[in-house]
């Protein structure tokens, strides 16, 4: 029998066997809540990266104009 696990914590660096609990012990609403939190965290991280690279682009454009 294959057992499925879900992470109790959301951070990738804390993902180890101590933070895993059998799927049967999770309720559907708790699983949905964790998926929502994971989505929100990854969406914020993606937006921060986009902002970072747009700032780098603007600095490079300003540098070229100043030259």
Image (cartoon, rainbow, N blue to C red):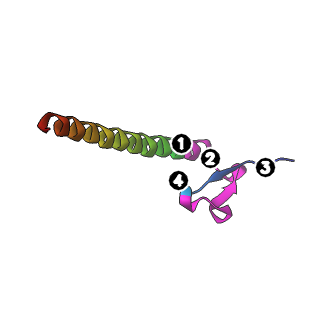
The span shown in magenta is: 13-31
Residue beneath disc 2: 27
Relative to 25, is 42 on the left or the right? left
* Residue 46 in the image, given as x and y percentages of width and height: 40, 40
Q: Does the magenta segment cover residue 15?
A: yes
Image position of 41 with respect to 13: above or below:
above
* Residue 43 in the image, given as x and y percentages of width and height: 42, 39
Residue beneath disc 1: 35
Res. 9 visible in picture:
no
Disc with the residue nearer the chain's start (2 vs 1): 2
Disc 4 versus disc 2: nearer the observer = 4
Q: Residues within 10 Å of mark 2 (few under 14, many from 20)?
A: few
Residue beneath disc 4: 10
- Label 2: element kind: loop
- Label 1: element kind: helix
Quadrant (top left/top right/bottom left/bottom right) for the C terminus: top left
- Label 3: element kind: loop
């Amino acid at each position: 029998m294959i057992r499925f696990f879900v992470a109790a914590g959301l951070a990738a660096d804390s993902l180890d066997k101590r933070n895993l609990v059998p799927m049967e012990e999770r309720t559907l609403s708790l699983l949905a809540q964790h998926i929502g939190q994971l989505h929100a965290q990854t969406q914020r991280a993606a937006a921060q990266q986009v902002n970072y690279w747009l700032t780098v682009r603007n600095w490079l454009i300003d540098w070229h104009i100043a030259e």
